[in-house]
Amino acid sequence: MKPIQQFFEKYITKEPLFVNKAVLQSTYEPTVLLHREKEIMALANIIAPALKLEKPSNVFIYGKTGTGKTLTTTHVTKQLLQVAKNKDIPLKILYVNCKLKNVADTEYRLIAHLAREFGKAIPPTGLPTEEIYKIFFSAIDNQKQVIILVLDEIDYLVKKIGDGILYNFTRINSELSTATLTLVGISNDLLFIEHVDPRIKSSLSEEELVFAPYNAFQLQDILRERAKKAFKEGVLETGVIEKCAAYAARDHGDARRALDLLRVAGEIAERQDSRTITIAHLDSAEEKIEKDKAIDIIESQPRQYLAVLYTILHLLATRKEKLFTGDVYDYYKDTLCHKLHLRPLTQRRVSDVVAELDMLGLINAKVVSKGRYGRTKEITHAMTPQTALRAKKLITEKLNL
DNA sequence: CGAGATTCATGTGAAGTATACCTTTAGGCTTAA
DNA sequence: AAGCCTAAAGGTATACTTCACATGAATCTCGTA
């Protein structure tokens, strides 16, 4: 028998470690959210008036990544929607992630996206933004209804295009006569609202919820609960859950990360034909996750961004000295763009691109003053060496270098 | 020796440009009465 | 005469460029002890 056939034969008979892998994926919504009872009730209280067709207060939710903000919000809004449906209450929930490139990363695109949710066809460009607002308003204002708009990662949007958009949000309800719209903003950055006009702040952030990071014990509870459903009995070696929780608690109690870690560890173990999941699997999982995340982001970046990122990775790998914007720009313009027959962007633009790559977490860029030797961004690694290497290879392929 | 001026390399804001796409409008052509 | 198609005119968003000014600590300068 050919080896590849043997592989397939074996594959069928192989004992899986998972019973239900979806439980560990980030799209999974558990029916019970552990250790978020207080937050759930708080949010429920805030938005409950919707059931009486009154406008609930606007809310801002703060918390680091993986503290259950998004999950809690979708959980609560879903339940609310369910009740509303049973009682025939006209309630709509809209959820938008502002970080999605070319979907909701500008004011025009965000409102256009919302209007499309209501079946309106909006061109990708060409109309005045004001016009898009009108279309959106007319789409929702044709009947008495309560709309709850959840804007995830709203801090990213505001950082990118400024806080003018928030001002426009403040006047939404005065434009509507029959419908009402409530804004639920979710932010990873606890400080970002402090930078906006206090009047806008008080209008949009009538209520605030802060999600504290999970501690190691809470993470363990969550992991155990999910692991029970995801894995067959007895596949987890003792200490794996504890270690997994400890890893995640180390950097700001990120539950999503902890779950990813567990899932990927399981996948690796399965591939290696292991009967159990060990701590060693956990370690390789940590590496793989980071790599996947970076690769994912890179996949969606335009050519110019890739070229700049490649330059940075290349220079960081080759030289020992610190790396500054000027060095990057020189190599990018003189060497890389030349090789790629790419029209070089100006230094001004590259400066912005570097800032965006920093926001995406692919690199670290910090503005430093070198006194007599000027002011610049000092650029350093944000990825582990292995990941950086993989990333560089991927870009090489994507750019046809 | 130390306070204040100078300097460098690039950050950063504002305004301008190119491109792609939109709606409106006016003219020309077709059609049906 | 009414209806329909087309192409030009006039408008916008976005990504990028151009222009011009801002930044901030190391270094220089010069008056003073």
Image: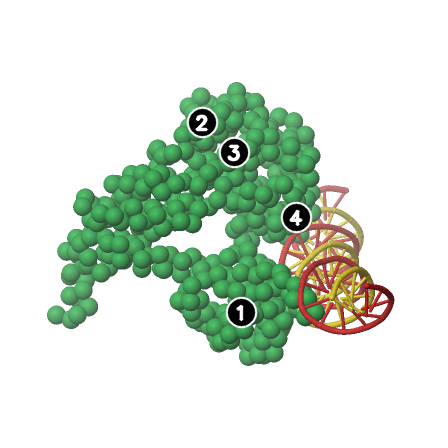
Chain colours: A green, B yellow, C red
Quarter of the figure with residue B15 = bottom right
Which residue occupies the foreground of this view, B3 or A9?
Answer: B3
Q: Earlier in the sequence, mark 1 or mark 4?
A: 4
Q: CA distance from mark 2 to mark 3?
A: 11 Å
Residue A104 visible in the snapshot: no
Q: CA distance from mark 2 to mark 4?
A: 32 Å
Q: CA distance from mark 1 to mark 3?
A: 39 Å
Q: Chain of mark 3?
A: A
Residue A328 location (% of width, % of height):
59, 71
Check residue A209 in the rendering and tell me which mark sits there, or answer none: 3
Q: Tell me the crowding category of disc 2: few under 14, some 14 to 19, or many 20 or more residues within 10 angstroms, Cα based.
A: few
- Give the residue pinned by disc 4: A162
Q: Earlier in the sequence, mark 2 or mark 4?
A: 2
Check residue A4 in the rendering and tell me which mark sits there, or answer none: none
- Give the residue pinned by disc 1: A312
- The three-letter code of the residue at mark 4 reads Gly
Asked which secondary structure carries label 2, the reply is helix
- Give the residue pinned by disc 2: A41
Residue A202 visible in the snapshot: yes
| Same chain for the residues under marks 2 and 4 in the image | yes
Q: Earlier in the sequence, mark 1 or mark 2?
A: 2
